[in-house]
Structures are given as structure tokens and as C-alpha cells.
Amino acid sequence: MQDFTFHTPVAVGDAAKLLGSCEDPKLIAGGMTLLPTLKQRLAEPTDLVDLGAIPDIKGICRDGDDIVIGAMTCHADVAASTLLLETIPGLAGLAGQIGDPAVRHRGTIGGSIANADPAADYPAAVLGFGATVVTNQRKIAGEDFFVGLFETALEPGEIITTVRFPIPVWSNYQKLRNPASGYAVVGVLVVQTKDGVRVAVTGAGGSAFRVSEMEEALSKDFSAKSLEGIKVDADGLNADMHASAAYRAHVIGVLAKRAVLSRA
Ligand SMILES: Cc1cc2nc3c(=O)[nH]c(=O)nc-3n(C[C@H](O)[C@H](O)[C@H](O)COP(=O)(O)OP(=O)(O)OC[C@H]3O[C@@H](n4cnc5c(N)ncnc54)[C@H](O)[C@@H]3O)c2cc1C
């Protein structure tokens, strides 16, 4: 690991100033992805700007019909949040399936979505719930946030402050875990809103995506039967040592049905 200067600003504005004034700075949240990257010298920033001492970008609250989660909120707090268990239990359930307890206590929602790992769980939530990513500069619709493999719409110097999730009618997340890391080989989130059903998939493509055919079928008839006959095209899906593209395509259908069947 290269030497770097470590900064601990206590306000987002101060963090933004550091990003603008340091030679080659990098934000650090829980360090779950960044620290291994530094150790392998895949990144060699001159300065690390720690977000951990900024109080107002951590925590979960309700604002009208939205649940607002601070970027520095760890996965364990999302999973255990009483407010979320009452309003969006499907999101708490998704966070509770991330990695293992150590990962869930260090990893943050802001770090996870900024990193945009194609096998991460939160991208399905950002897309499936129709969330809005709020930064120190603007609001980014969930649909526009993930632009490719490990790529987001964030500009250099932009800091995620909160993620806003509209409270849906119902939701459920099902996941086929990589048994070693816990990352999603495939993850499927089904969300019922007052305007229809949304189905978001992670793990299977370069970035999370929605399955419009399933959404249309479930919006007309919310039953596992209505998904029968819908085949997800394997073309362009991820293929690696864990699963072929055809297997992932098949598993999307299986997990979507499981999610629907979980509705009592
Ligand atoms: C063993 C292991 C298993 C895992 N299993 C899973 C899993 O099953 N599912 C899953 O979804 N994830 C999994 N993860 C990922 C983990 O949950 C973290 O969310 C992820 O590693 C990001 O970590 P972090 O929040 O500590 O961010 P960091 O590692 O600190 O930062 C990651 C990147 O985001 C940037 N960043 C951080 N915060 C912000 C912000 N507020 N604004 C803008 N940019 C920011 C940083 O500059 C850096 O580039 C796993 C990780 C490990 C190590």
C-alpha cells in the first residue's frame, strides 16, 4: 500500500473541499472494497477522505412517503431498522442477506452503490424501488444511476449523501448467494407499488436491470402462474466460473416466482 494522507472531515462541505483541493483523493466509507484495492495497489490515492465522522449522512428516517437512508448507514443497521421493518421490510431483508456479519457492520449503502459491483444487492433495490440517489450536488433517479460494470453517473468530486426509497405496497428479495462471498450470483427483487409491479435483477448482467415482461404480467395478475412461459434472454448475461448465462437466465425466473409466492 502506498503512503497517503488521511482526512476526517465532519461536514459534507469540508469533504467536498478536500476532494477539490487534494492531488488524487479518494473517499472512504467502511473500506470494505477500497482497502483491499489499496493493498493490491489497484488504486494509489494521495489522500483518503473518510466519511465516517460526518454525523448527518448516517441513519434512517421517514420523510413523507419516502424512507431516507444516510450514505454512511451500514447494512446491519438497515437490516435491523424498526422503521424499515414496518415500512419496507423487503429492503431490510435485502440488506440482511449481504455478505456476513463483519461485512454488514462495516459496509455502507453509499459505498455499495458508488462501487456498483454487478453482483451487489443494493443495485436491485435502487432500481426496483425506484429510489433517488441524493448527492452533495444533485438528485439522480435510480434508473439513471448505474451506467455499466462498476460505473455510475457520479461525477468526480460528487458525494452520495442519502438514498430515498418510496414506500411501496409490498416487496420481497430473493437471492442465489455465492457460497464463498455471499454476493449475488443472481438476485431478484419484486416490488408492488400503487402504479404496478417492478422486477429488478442483480448479479446476472453488467449492471442491475428490470424485466419488463414480468412486470407487465404481474401487474395484470400477481401470481407465480402469470410468470410461467416468460423466458429471460441469456444473451449478454454474465457467464463465469459460478454460473453460465443460460443458468442465470433460468434462475431469474425461479427467484421471481419464489418472491411472488412469499406473499402470504
Ligand atoms: C467478503 C465480502 C463479502 C461481500 N458480500 C457482499 C454481498 O453479499 N452483497 C453485497 O451487496 N455486497 C457485498 N460486499 C460488499 C460490501 O457490502 C460493501 O458494501 C462494499 O464493499 C462497499 O464497501 P464500503 O461501504 O465500505 O465502501 P468503501 O470500500 O469505503 O468504498 C467503496 C467505493 O465507494 C466510494 N464511496 C464510498 N462512499 C461514498 C459516498 N458516500 N459517495 C461517493 N462515493 C463513495 C469510495 O471512494 C470507493 O470507491 C462484500 C464485501 C466483502 C469484502
Image (cartoon, helix red, strand yellow):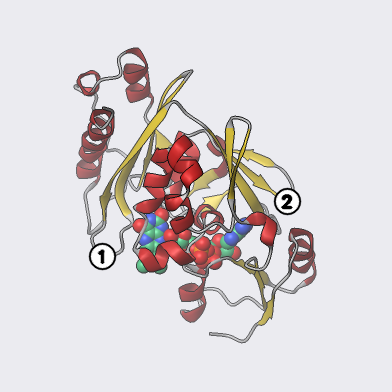
Residue 240 % position (x, y):
26, 56
Q: Position of residue 115 (x, y in %)?
A: 51, 57
Q: Quadrant of residue 101?
A: bottom left
Judging depth in this view, the residue of 110 and 246 nearest the camera is 110
Percent x, y of residue 194: 48, 19
For label 2, being within 8 Å of ligand 1 is answered: no
**Residue 72 in picture, x, y percent from top left:** 58, 59
Instruction: Compare residues 211 and 239 and report the one nearer the observer.
Output: 211
Tag 2 secondary structure: loop
Horizontal relation, residue 250 to residue 194: left or right: left
Residue at the spot of label 2: 136
Closer to the camera in the image, 50 or 85: 85
Q: Name the residue carrying label 1.
A: 180
> Which residue does the image show at 53% across and 67% down from the upper left?
30
Q: Residues within 10 Å of mark 2 (few under 14, many from 20)?
A: some
Three-letter code, disc 1: Ala
Report the residue at 44% width, 25% height from top. 169
Q: Is mark 1 within 8 Å of ligand 1?
A: no
Task: Say which mark, if any, is on residue 156.
Answer: none
**Left or right of 158, for residue 194:** left
Amino acid type shown at disc 2: Asn
Which image quarter: residue 63? Answer: top right
Q: Outermost residue, top direction?
A: 220
Is there CB contact under 8 Å for labels 1 and 2? Answer: no
Left or right: 37, with 159 as reference point: left
Distance CA(mark 1)–CA(mark 2) = 36 Å
